[in-house]
Image: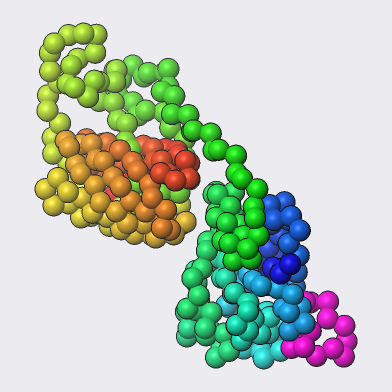
C-alpha cells in the first residue's frame, strides 16, 4: 500500500504537522506515514535517501506555515535558497515524480507562496491547489483532506457518523431596563458577516411591527441605513461594503482568509450569503441605529459551525 510523506519545517509548523499525523493515523488505518528525512545518516546522499522514501509514497503533504518561505539559517540566508535544504529536496524530488501527488497544506494562517517566492525547482508547487487547515475548524478541514487522500490512494474509508444538527442559539433570559444589546459571545470564522441584535427599548420587538404584549400599535418605521464603506473586526480583519439600493455587496480579508458575498437590506436587517475560504455561509444581521455597528450570528451551510460576532465601521 502506498504511503503518505509529510514534509514540514520544525521551526515553522512542527506542532501542526504532528497534530495532522496523529489525525491521519486515527482515520487512515494501515496507510504508512513518513514524517520527514531529517535523520539521514552521515555519508548518505540526500537526494537518494529522499527518493528511496518517496518510492513507497503516493502523496507528499507539504505543510506550509507562516515562516516556511522566509525562515533563515544561522548565517542569515534563506533556507529555501540552499540546494541542500531538506525541505526543498523533499518537495522538489516529489515534484519530479509522476507517481507522487504533491498537496500544499496551509496551517496557522499561512498564505500560498507565489512562484516568485520559490527557487526554480519548487516553482511548480505554486500551481498546486492547496488545502487550508484552521484551528477553529480543524476536525472538518482535516476530514476533507482525509477524503481527498482516500480517493487518491484508493483506500476505502470507514463511513462517517452523521453530524449532529447544531442547536439554535438560545435567547438570553436577561433584559435590561433601558437600551441594551442582545447578549452575545465572540464566534469563529465569517468575521465579515454579523447579525446585530440592538434593542431600542426595554423589550425586544416583534418583526411584524406589533408592540409586545399584544397591542395593535405600530412601531415607527426604521430609518434607512447606509452600509457602504470600510469595516473592521476586533481581530484585525478589514472589509468593504458597497450598497446600491437594497442590494449590498462585500469583500475583504478576515484573519481566517478571504471573504466575499452579497445580501439584501430590508430596513436595518440584512440577509447575506457569502463564502469564507470557499466554504458557504449564511447570516441575517441588523445594524445599530447609528450605523456604526453590526452584531450577530453566522452559520456555516456545510460545516454547521455558528456563533455571534461583531463588526464596526472603520474610522
What residue is rendered at 20% in x and 55% in y?
242
What residue is rendered at 63% in x and 77% in y?
100
Give coordinates of residue 46: x percent, y percent.
Answer: 77, 87
Task: From this view, report whether residue 262 is shown above or below residue 154.
Answer: above
Q: Going by the picture, which residue comes out furthest to the top?
A: 214
Left or right: residue 103 versus residue 310 is: right
Nearer the observer, 17 or 232? 17
Report if residue 47 lies within the magenta region: yes
Give coordinates of residue 129: x percent, y percent.
Answer: 49, 70
| Viewer can see residue 286 | yes
What residue is rendered at 41% in x and 40% in y?
299
Image quadrant in which you'd find residue 308: top left
Q: How would you classify the magenta stretch by its main secondary structure? A: loop
Which contiguous range is marked in magenta?
A: 37-49
| Viewer can see residue 237 | no
Left or right: residue 272 versus residue 1 is: left
Quarter in which the N terminus is drawn: bottom right
Question: Could you tell me how many numbered marks the image carries?
Answer: 0
Left or right: residue 253 versus residue 59 is: left
What residue is rendered at 39% in x and 37% in y?
297
Report if residue 119 lies within the magenta region: no
Amino acid at each position: 500500500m502506498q504511503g503518505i510523506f509529510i514534509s514540514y519545517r520544525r521551526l515553522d509548523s512542527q506542532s501542526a504537522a504532528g497534530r495532522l499525523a496523529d489525525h491521519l493515523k486515527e482515520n487512515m488505518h494501515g496507510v504508512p506515514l513518513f514524517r520527514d528525512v531529517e535523520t539521514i545518516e552521515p555519508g548518505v546522499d540526500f537526494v537518494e535517501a529522499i527518493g528511496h522514501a518517496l518510492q513507497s509514497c503516493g502523496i507528499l503533504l507539504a505543510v506550509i506555515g507562516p515562516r516556511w518561505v522566509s525562515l533563515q539559517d544561522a548565517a542569515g540566508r534563506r533556507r529555501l535558497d540552499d540546494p541542500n535544504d531538506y525541505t526543498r529536496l523533499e518537495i522538489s524530488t516529489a515534484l519530479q515524480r509522476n507517481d507522487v501527488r504533491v498537496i500544499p497544506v496551509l496551517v496557522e494562517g499561512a498564505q500560498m507562496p507565489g512562484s516568485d517566492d520559490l527557487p526554480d525547482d519548487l516553482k511548480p508547487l505554486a500551481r498546486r491547489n492547496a488545502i487550508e487547515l484552521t484551528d477553529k475548524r480543524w476536525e472538518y478541514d482535516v476530514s476533507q483532506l482525509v477524503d481527498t487522500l482516500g480517493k487518491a490512494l484508493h483506500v476505502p474509508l470507514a463511513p462517517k457518523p452523521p453530524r449532529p444538527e447544531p442547536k439554535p442559539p438560545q435567547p438570553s433570559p436577561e433584559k435590561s431596563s433601558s437600551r441594551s444589546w442582545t447578549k452575545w459571545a465572540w464566534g469563529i470564522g465569517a468575521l465579515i458577516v454579523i447579525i446585530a441584535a440592538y434593542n431600542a427599548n426595554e423589550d425586544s420587538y416583534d418583526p411584524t411591527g406589533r408592540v409586545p404584549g399584544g397591542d395593535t400599535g405600530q412601531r415607527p418605521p426604521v430609518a434607512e441605513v447606509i452600509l457602504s464603506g470600510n469595516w473592521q473586526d476586533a481581530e484585525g480583519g478589514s472589509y468593504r461594503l458597497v450598497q446600491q439600493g437594497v442590494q449590498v455587496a462585500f469583500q475583504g480579508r478576515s484573519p481566517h482568509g478571504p471573504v466575499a458575498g452579497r445580501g439584501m437590506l430590508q430596513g436595518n436587517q440584512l440577509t447575506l450569503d457569502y463564502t469564507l475560504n470557499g466554504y458557504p455561509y449564511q447570516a441575517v444581521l441588523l445594524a445599530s441605529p447609528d450605523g456604526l455597528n453590526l452584531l450577530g450570528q453566522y452559520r456555516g451551510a456545510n460545516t454547521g459551525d455558528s456563533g455571534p460576532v461583531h463588526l464596526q465601521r472603520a474610522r
